[in-house]
Image: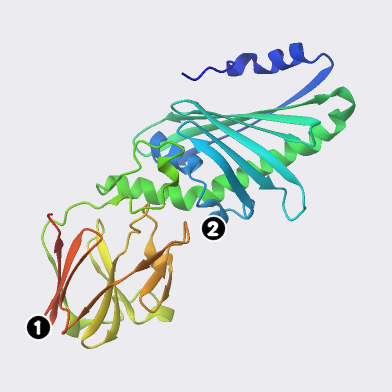
């Protein structure tokens, strides 16, 4: 059972605990695409931070459980370490705390709430606490925290908007419902919607219309908006195929880095090997689909098993 001080009484409780404490309060609010569930997953997922956020280029996860996480974070490029504690108080509410030099204590309350089927609200408030003689530093730190939150929400937009779109298309994730453990599993968590009918690709009709961009002219995209596939043409009889949505947690692999038979996920840096089709090996099952090369066609169908 988790017990915590109510957010409305926290500042008073600390001031009563330590007489002479100065408190500065700040706030940041915004709307974010997606459900509360996906905002929670985004908040608890540590692995995306080095790839999406410049702020978290160096972070060490010390320990975690379903409702808490303890991390060691560097302050920019300085050899200065901050111990960050994250706690999930209840659905849609989190406490995050850290101290600076043992002299300044920062407590953040993060709250997420439903607005409509497309958007959720995100409200972040923080208390900066220290002895009164350090109060002049509060103003600088308050601005720093506000700017940090503005930047983090902008950088996370690509993740939140993509997950919101995938939910509309019928995707689900094995990491649902999220917690600090499930959100950090580097396994194939994407559950793809079923194909309404097999996708048939005529390998003689690969054109620039289907090409992803000029730099990736050997890469082609086929399928519907709900579910599509990336095909890399090696020769007229050899191909690599991937789902265009990352098997891990739903990133667009169109934005990934392709090298030989692998693509690197832009969100988490994971590598995924393509399904290789050739005349010698014309059928393969991978990522929940069956790929078959027969005559002049590649056929993609659901793996019902």
- 269 relative to 151, above or below: below
Secondary element at image label 1? loop
Separation of residues labelled 2 and 1 (CA atoms): 41 Å
Indicate the quadrant where residue 135 lies. top right
Q: Residue at x 58, y 53 (%)?
A: 53
Instruction: Indicate the position of residue 71 as horizontal and vertical percent values.
Output: 61, 41
- 158 relative to 199, above or below: above
Instruction: Indicate the position of residue 96 as horizontal and vertical percent values.
Output: 60, 32
Q: Residue at x 53, y 17 (%)?
A: 3
Instruction: Indicate the position of residue 89 as horizontal and vertical percent values.
Output: 50, 24
Left/right of residue 291 with respect to residue 7 in the rendered view: left
Please say which color scheme the image uses.
Answer: rainbow
Instruction: Indicate which disc, 2 or 1, sits on the residue closer to the N terminus.
Output: 2
Indicate the quadrant where residue 276 lies. bottom left
Residue at the extreme bottom: 236
Secondary element at image label 2? helix
Residue 33 visible (yes or no):
no
Please name the residue that numbered disc 2 is placed on: 51
Q: Which mark is residue 115?
A: none
Please name the residue that numbered disc 1 is placed on: 295
């Amino acid at each position: 059972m988790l017990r915590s001080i109510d957010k409305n009484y926290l500042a008073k409780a600390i001031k009563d605990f330590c007489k002479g404490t100065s408190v500065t309060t700040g706030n940041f609010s915004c709307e974010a695409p997606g459900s509360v569930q996906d905002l929670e997953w985004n908040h608890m997922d540590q692995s995306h931070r080095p790839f999406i956020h410049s702020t978290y280029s160096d972070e060490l996860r010390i320990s975690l459980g379903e409702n808490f996480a303890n991390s060691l974070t560097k302050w920019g490029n300085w050899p200065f370490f901050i111990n960050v504690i994250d706690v999930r108080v209840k659905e849609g509410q989190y406490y995050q705390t850290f101290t600076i030099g043992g002299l300044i204590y920062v407590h953040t309350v993060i709250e997420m709430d439903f607005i409509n089927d497309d958007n959720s609200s995100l409200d972040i408030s923080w208390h900066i606490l220290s002895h009164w003689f350090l109060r002049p530093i509060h103003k600088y730190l308050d601005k720093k925290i506000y700017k940090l939150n503005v930047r983090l929400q902008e950088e996370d937009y690509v993740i939140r908007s993509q997950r919101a779109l995938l939910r509309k298309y019928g995707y689900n994730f094995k990491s649902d419902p999220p917690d600090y453990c499930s959100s950090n599993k580097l396994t194939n968590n994407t559950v793809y919607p079923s194909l309404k009918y097999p996708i048939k690709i005529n390998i003689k009709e690969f054109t620039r219309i289907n090409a992803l961009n000029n730099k990736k002219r050997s890469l082609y995209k086929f399928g519907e908006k709900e579910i599509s596939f990336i095909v890399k043409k090696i020769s007229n009889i050899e191909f690599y195929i991937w789902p265009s949505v990352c098997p891990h947690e739903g990133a667009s692999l169109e934005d990934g880095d392709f090298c030989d038979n692998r693509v690197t996920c832009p969100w988490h840096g994971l590598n995924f090997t393509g399904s290789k089709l050739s005349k010698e090996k014309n059928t393969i099952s991978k990522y929940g689909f069956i790929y078959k090369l027969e005559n002049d066609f590649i056929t993609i169908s659901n793996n019902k098993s």
